[in-house]
Image: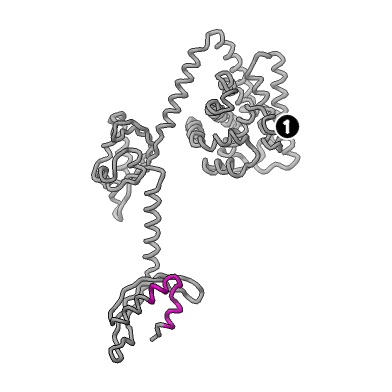
Amino acid sequence: QITIEAYQKYVHQNDLKYYNEKVKKALSVGSSYDIEYRLVSPKGHSIYVREIAKVIEYDHDKPIVLVGFIQDITQFKESQIRLRLYEEAIHSSPSSVVITDDKGSIVFVNEMFTKITGYSYEEAIGQNPRILNSGYHDKAYFDNFWSTLLSGKVFTGEIKNKKKDGTLFWESTRIAPVFNEDHEITHYVAIKDDITKQKELQENLLTQKNVLENLVSEKNKEIYNSQVSMSIALAKLSESRDSNTGEHIERVQALCHYLTFELSRVYPFSEVIDKKFLDTIYYASILHDIGKVGIPDEILHKPGKLTKDEFEIMKRHTVIGANTLEEMAIFNSENDIIKMGIEIAKYHHERYDGSGYNEGLKGDEIPLSARIMAIVDVYDALRSVRPYKRAFSHDETVYIITKESEGHFDPRILNLFSQIHMNFELIYDSSKNKK
């Protein structure tokens, strides 16, 4: 036996008032009680318990003895807490979540689903996801869709769907089957993201590219193509030394073009970036690392951290590249790609706060083309595998660029990057998938 006063020492302080109220009430009327609370061990470890007790002995109608049992329900309570967390995470997810039974009837949708599609929770429950079918995809698409799921695999793809009001939209979709203990499919869970804006961006870029090409005269095309051929030939020098550098060059080209396009719509860059600038940086960007042809193999391909002396040699690639292009510019004074290539090759390792190399330029002293290249070059380098490091994920890379690179980048360009970085991921992954 133990007295209530002695037992109270083990009741968690936050639960003590509740515990005392329940016990006091039971003693006052001679009834039983069933309560849940926490106990604390002498070492400070807490557990959840359930206590069921009743009065069994009285002294002149005054309850004096309780009998009951205490059950450890810690695992059950912690499971409840986890379930509530999971439920809140699903409801608050920025992605649309849909769960169906094995027949395809919707049993759950989260708030983002209702926001995107226009269907309320009550309207969606019991329906088949075919209510979103836009008719865009053919039978072969859905045959592959179902054969993937019924084989127990996860389906991933892009689907053009239709909202309640008839508006068409694109979703990036990942659907996974859920199995019971007998490995039978009982449900399907779909996680979907609205990528309509990204698809429109891709279409707009393609349209703009086609329009620009149609506006260029045949003569200008010949001149421009000769400049492009020259820049590509020079870039191939870097690729011949390092295949990773070659792939890096191609991704940087696409990312530079996209970032510059977005900057052209933002003041004050809109005052500087015109069609000619946009076209020029697309090809000039691939010249940023041509100076690496002058770096010894044992340094360029070293599978570890460079020594101080080795790093000084590596830094020379900016000077080597710029000098090479400057010599070519003597005989190609009208070649805008070479001119911008000199800026990029020479200054893309300068930092906005003046702590970069090789000249320590600061702020807008650094040419705009090099400031654009700086953030693109770092993004691609972090995302890529190198002999001395692993590839960082998109989220890790964005964090490093936005949170751990103070003073490195033009803050205005960095601010825009923080708004559009998801499209960087799309462009990077698209380029990787082509390999």
Q: Is residue 153 visible?
A: no
Q: Position of residue 26 (x, y in %)?
A: 31, 79
Report the quarter where the N terminus lies: bottom left
Tell me which corner region of the image, top left, top right, bottom left or bottom right, holds residue 61. Answer: bottom left
SS label for mark 1: loop
Above or below — where is 152 with respect to 29? above
Q: Position of residue 142 (x, y in %)?
A: 30, 34
Tally the marks. 1
Q: List the single residue furthest toward the bottom.
A: 60
- Residue 58 in magenta? no
Q: Position of residue 36 (x, y in %)?
A: 36, 71
- Please state if 403 lies on the left or on the right of 27 as rendered: right
The residue where tag 1 is placed is: 316
Instruction: Characterize the local packing of mark 1: few (<14), some (14-19) or many (20 or more) Cα atoms within 10 angstroms.
Output: some
Q: Position of residue 344 (x, y in %)?
A: 65, 27
The residue lying at 38 percent from left, 61 percent from top is 79
The residue lying at 46 percent from left, 22 percent from top is 206
Residues rendered magenta in the picture: 5-20
The residue lying at 74 percent from left, 37 percent from top is 312
Tell me which corner region of the image, top left, top right, bottom left or bottom right, holds residue 402. Answer: top right
Q: Amino acid at mark 1?
A: Arg
Query: Which sits in the foreground, 251 or 271?
Result: 271
